[in-house]
Image: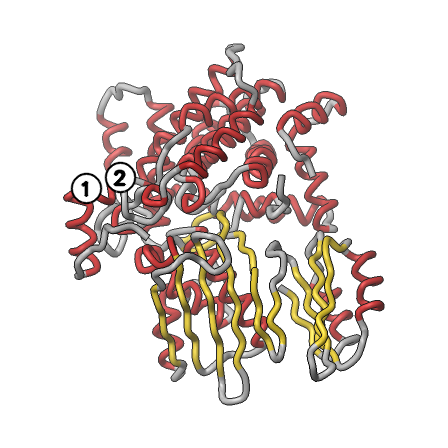
Amino acid sequence: MFTSIEELVAAAVKQHVTLSDLMIEQEMQNTNSTKDEVWTAMERNLAVMADAVKKGASGEGVYSQTGLTGGEAVKLKKYRQSHHTLAGDTVLEAVQDAIATNEVNASMGVICATPTAGSSGTLPGVLFMLRKRLNLNHEQLVRFLFTAGAFGLIIANNAMIAGATGGCQAEVGSASAMAAAAAVEAAGGTPQQSAEALAMALSNLLGLVCDPVAGLVELPCVKRNAIGAGNALIAADMALAGLTNKIPADEVVAAMKKIGEDMPQTLRETGLGGLAATPTGIKMKMQIFGKSVDLGGV
Amino acid sequence: MTTNYKSVFDIIGPVMIGPSSSHTAGAVAIGQAARKVFQSTPREIVVHYFESFAQTHRGHGTDYAIVSGVLGFSPADARVPQAVTIARQQQIKVVFKEEKGKSPIGHPNTAVIQLKNAQKSIEIAGCSIGGGTIEIRRIKVGEFDIQPQGALPVLLALDDDRTDQLLLEQLEVLTGINYHHIYVADTGRQLAEFDLNKRLKQDEVRALNSTVAELIYL
């Protein structure tokens, strides 16, 4: 198992292989599997992601049982078709796919957690936009997921990927960092540029709290994936342009862990702080669950 | 560094019914672990929630997720959101309790599950550490009350006499062993706990199963 990003990048450089190759090799060893088995399993996950992106933006869209979220991927799709967007169509396509995926998740549809369900839109948002932008073939799409997974494993083992232990920085932050690193490889960048993209993407989202209204993975989770996807693209472009983060990726991951540990419990997926504790957030919780809300902490 | 996450599919996956990997997919996994320890469908399910689980289980669908696992559903099973109704239709008693105190196993996403029928009861304490990955940090089964290290996979072998040496040798070859411990009850029965480095394949579990009285593979 690779224990650090530095080690992963060094191995890729030394062996003249891609990061996705290293991940596939490690997975085969760790699970006593053949390359075919590992590859096919990842293809199935890719298919689930493609379905969710499509489902969320089809027809009138999908809606959660509470009505707090839904139908907004469709709004973005229509807006893209009829307007000159400010951020540009490339970015907004990624945003649309990210939101579509998380709307499917909030409506209890089927998604692939990347690395979590709450952050499941970020990676597909980047991936499917790049498919068009870079003309990626099927093999490259699958490889993108292995590369993202390689970095995600190191983040998960060295820090955390749960909002309850590290806040949203650990979920959307990790997803955005993974997507940025994989985007660099897909665009032909070096392993070190992938590490820089990861470091920049994660640095930009450090400190992000997990404050779901009514404890539901809806507000603000769905739109946080929009910023996760946009941030990943910006970080990947910065890395490909030769910008560096100065603070190495492994140290950014360690900083994320420490920040997560220092974060008060009200801001770690308890639905007791941040947006969840606003007057409107509390009102929504009471309307949904029909009882008074104790904000005294746990 | 820990190695709780061992597979790329812990990160890119699982494929699951929303909305939360830790509070829904991970909760299904904790329920599945409880079912494996109980080894059948119980007549009564009691779930105690702590910390984040206590605060947000309703919004995250944790209730139906845990019951799904106990019923043997996978996280991507379309029946997951209806699991509590399905259980009650089968006359299974289902109770959820929001506990005020800190988690007894030191994690904010903690569920303690008790499963019972007329003959037996078991209890496990599990936590969902993110992305659908779980740890099981306490198991009460038969006369045993053990505290595994947490990370899965874990293999438990219960038998009347010592069979652990044979298992130990086989597991060393198949997966490697991270930790192992033998518990001996007053009755003389023993429980061998093996924390494995890799997951076993199904046919490997079946082969091992034939060598001991009772095998629980989490």
Instruction: Determine whether, in the image, residue A29 is placed left or right of residue B170.
Output: left
Chain bearing mark 2? A
The image's mark for residue A278 is: 1
Residue A68: image x %, image y %? 22, 48
Q: Quadrant of residue A157?
A: top right
Question: Few, some or many C-alpha atoms within 10 Å of disc 2 (few <14, some 14-19, many ≥20)?
Answer: some
Q: Quadrant of residue B164?
A: bottom right
Chain bearing mark 1? A
Residue at 55% x, 40% y is A156
Measured in 3D between alpha carbons, the distance from the residue under mark 2 to the one under mark 1, in whole angstroms, is 7 Å
Residue at 53% x, 30% y is A253
- Quarter of the image that includes the N terminus of chain B: top right
Q: Is residue B114 above or below residue A264?
A: below
The amino acid type of the residue labelled 2 equals: Gly
Question: Which is more toward the observer, A246 or B186?
Answer: B186
Residue at 34% x, 74% y is B85
Q: Which residue is mark 2?
A: A274
Residue at 64% x, 31% y is A4
- Does the image show residue B80? yes
Question: Which is more toward the observer, B83 or B112?
Answer: B112
